[in-house]
Image (spheres, rainbow, N blue to C red):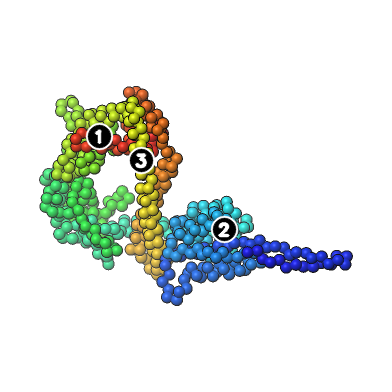
Amino acid sequence: MTPVAVARTSHRRGVRVAIPAPVLQTVRCAIYTRQSVEDRTDNGFTSLDAQREAGEAFVASMKSEGWVVVPARYDDGGFTGGNTERPALQRLLTDIGQGQVDVVVVYKIDRLSRSLLDFLKLIEFFEQRHVAFVAVTQQINTATSAGKLMLHILASFASYERAIISERTSDKMCAARRKGKYMGGPAILGFGVDRDKKRLIVDPDEAEMVRALFDLYLLHRSLLRVAQLANERGWCTKSWTSRGGARREGGPWDKAKLQRVLTDVTYTGMVWHAGDILPGEHEAIIDQETFDRVQQIIKENGNGSGHVSRSKHPALLKGLLRCGRCGAAMTNTYTKKGTRLYRYYLCLSRDKRGRDACAAPYLPAQDIEDLVVDQIRRLARDPELAQAVFREAASQQQALVPRLQTERQRLVRDRQAKSEQIQRLVAVLATADSPQPSVSERLAELEGLVGKVNHRLTEIDLELTALGQNRIDPDDVARALAQFDDLWDVLYPQERSRLVRSLIATITYEAAGDVRIALNPGAIRDVG
């Protein structure tokens, strides 16, 4: 609202002249507040209220400059400053984009963001829209060059402080691990956790199962056979209860789960850290000699199945072919008779858990590879089939976007929850009078999980961007398929494999011999 000007008068040569007072331009100020945890005080006055009062007082002191507080409130209670996924902040950015804000006022710069990269991006966003930034308690005002310099200096120190806390936590965990201490997480089969002493304790019943698994492997020398025997006896993998009280029940054995047990040095009373095997604080379940004998057999078997490794020869459809019976991937294998080599594809469910898991037969590799290549060539020669492929590829592309968006929303919520936990743990460490090993351990674990979530979110964003920029049309499909027929006969095996992967997302082999090919919509445009 524009202030009312007060007229002044001046007498010039006996003539009374009215001189209008300068009209102040209204400066709309949005006060943003944030706290990492929900305030549990009973008096109703929270940290958000205190921050807002400080902001309002500062704006009132600038009243002579035309500063006024906008009616909208931008309060984020219980949100971390480590990312920008905060509802009030997003509303503020939207209002700034619509030209409704001239100045953003915060109590301290870390209320806006604790991430230097996010902070600088926000400041750049403000500057592009000619919006000033003010930190009340740090005398920062980006309307001046000195304020901009001080802002970047303080933001750098805030980021540095956060990095130092993370490094200290990591160093402390490494030092504890080198002493053989238990560093948190669910216990493995054969052990329980003494939460008070922070160490692994042997579970007698499960320890007997572990010893039996080692003995069975020494007898049969086959992961598949031992997994089958364990399932026949009703043995299950480890069941455990999380810190939150959630129960995780064990399940049936397969080759991969069994191999993880048979190769875990924890059972020998040792711990693994940064490539080194060190003495642990817990008791051993398996003697070193038995453990070494098992490792030697696994090494001799190559893939731990009781026979030599079957993945020495390249396969055109590796990673693409799936079993139509159970939906599992099909891996390549081979056998030799004399000097002749016979290649096959085998369902992984059957390979891991035996014929009872999936009755899909061995599939001759050359036959299925020739069939797939012939089908692609038919698509290139038949315009109607090419149109059908386009419709299918477009449908796949359209269906992929909402799936990625749903996954992204879930990951953002997960990151938000973990980030809030991190902030609470950091606050505990900052106020503790003595070291808190369990808190430090949990903090490092959560930071690792947040890092993985951020990595996956980046991958999803790149996929969504690629899908938005690479929409296919019938000409793309026809051009890509036509080039396939011309190139195939002159390509080397590795080049053929890359070309097939650029065109095809999955190949499903049905029991009746039918093959369903799902094209890769994200790469057809590049091939064409």
The residue to which callout 2 is attached is: 100
Q: Which residue is found at the position 32% from the left and 59% from the top?
A: 176
Q: Which mark is residue 515?
A: 1
Q: Residue furthest right?
A: 13
Nearest the camera: 451 or 461? 461
- Report helix, strand or loop for mark 3: helix
Give the quarter of the figure containing the C terminus: top left
Q: Which mark is residue 350?
A: none
| Vertical side of 443 occupied by 343: above or below | above
Give left or right: position of 221 versus 281: left
The residue to which callout 3 is attached is: 395
Which of the two marks, 1 or 3, is nearer to us in this view? 3
Three-letter residue code for mark 3:
Ser
Which of the two marks, 2 or 3, is nearer to us in this view? 3
Three-letter residue code for mark 2:
Gln
Q: Which residue is found at the position 68% from the left and 66% from the top?
A: 4
| Vertical side of 55 occupied by 114: above or below | above
Q: How many numbered circles are shown?
A: 3
Closer to the N terminus: mark 2 or mark 3? 2
Nearest the camera: 123 or 145? 123
Three-letter residue code for mark 1:
Val
The location of residue 51, given as percent across then percent down, is 51, 68
Closer to the N terminus: mark 1 or mark 3? 3
Q: Are marks 1 and 2 in contact (CB under 8 Å)?
A: no
The location of residue 370, given as percent across then percent down, is 26, 28
Give left or right: position of 523 versus 71: left
Give the quarter of the figure containing the N terminus: bottom right
